[in-house]
Image (cartoon, helix red, strand yellow):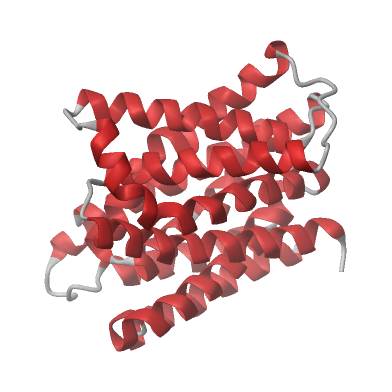
Amino acid sequence: MSLPILLALMAGTLWGLNMVASGWGVDSSGVSSDIGAFASISVAAIVAASTAVIAGVPTTGADFGSLWRFALIGAIAPGASQGMFFAAIKSIGPARTGLFVGTAPMLSVILAILFIGEPWRIAILMGTLLTVAGGIIISLEGGTSNPRGFVRGGSLLALATAFTFGLRDVAARQLTVDIKVEVWWASTAILTSAAITIAVIALARGATLVSDTRRAMPHLLVSGTLVGFALPTLIWALSEGDVGVVAPLANAAQIFSVVAAASWLHGSRERSPRLLIALGLVLAGGTIIGMTN
């Protein structure tokens, strides 16, 4: 197994577990999605920075001229997107959010083709159609007789999150090729910027940041720790392999882990027949896309 594939599978598994941990943390603490996101990402930034320091990761190239580009990525995802991600989990559950966010590889591949010159193949179209079909099935989870199933708030939030993740993957791939910064420091810049962005959004919405974060922090430590390792692993994978390989494989591992964990925690509510059918379609689409590279 090649290094990019191994790293992609590891990153996807960590992201999937984070989805379930995030849902539990927000529900247990009773805080808003913005506060939950801030607590989780703040912990993740500390984890990434601490790991870099403890492991003695070289700081070569980690100057402001390089790191601000990664900080810009962080402001978009997981910065602005993280509040949407937590809100989607609260609205439609971690497994369904995971499947919507699972369309991110489709968006990543399309953006990579359009903007960084990765090749287009017919199998990519097939994988894309399967992935979208899985998303439509989940959109109709409330019942096919209700056309508003397509525009349920949680579904739209999860899809918007997927788009920002697609942007993150393509930008991270391009930057790691052009800029030689160790992935742990690049990830620290991304996560720190994301935490600041989320804090600004939370304050603008009238949150009492300090007291709410103090209440949320014990419940979001697991989520933050998972993100603190998941993002550097994903950035590392993108620095070693094409978006078209890394994104679908990370997605497959993410979906398996989130559905398995959510099923264990929440029982039959997170493993309905419709959900499992959609799972199969999204996994098949991601696998086909990955096999083309």
Q: Is residue 79 visible?
A: yes
When asked about the image quadrant of residue 144, the answer is bottom left
Q: As rendered, which of 41 and 66 lies closer to the eye?
A: 41
Percent across and percent down for residue 172 are 67, 35
Q: As rendered, which of 257 and 247 lies closer to the eye?
A: 257
Residue at image point 70% right, 59% down? 8
* Quadrant location, the N terminus: bottom right
Percent across and percent down for residue 195 are 45, 32
Q: Residue furthest top?
A: 65
How many marks do you count on the picture?
0
Residue at image point 38% right, 39% down? 38
Q: Is residue 120 visible?
A: no
Q: In the visual, does 276 lie left or right of 173?
A: left
Q: In the visual, does 38 lie left or right of 116?
A: left
Residue at image point 47% right, 32% down? 194
* Quadrant location, the C terminus: bottom right
Q: As rendered, which of 24 and 161 lies closer to the eye?
A: 24
Residue at image point 42% right, 68% down? 133
Q: Please say if 91 is above or below 113.
A: below
Percent across and percent down for residue 125 are 59, 59
Q: In the visual, does 278 lie left or right of 58?
A: left
Percent across and percent down for residue 161 are 41, 46
Q: Please say if 178 is above or below 244.
A: above
Q: Please say if 292 is above or below 207.
A: below
Q: In the visual, does 152 lie left or right of 129?
A: left
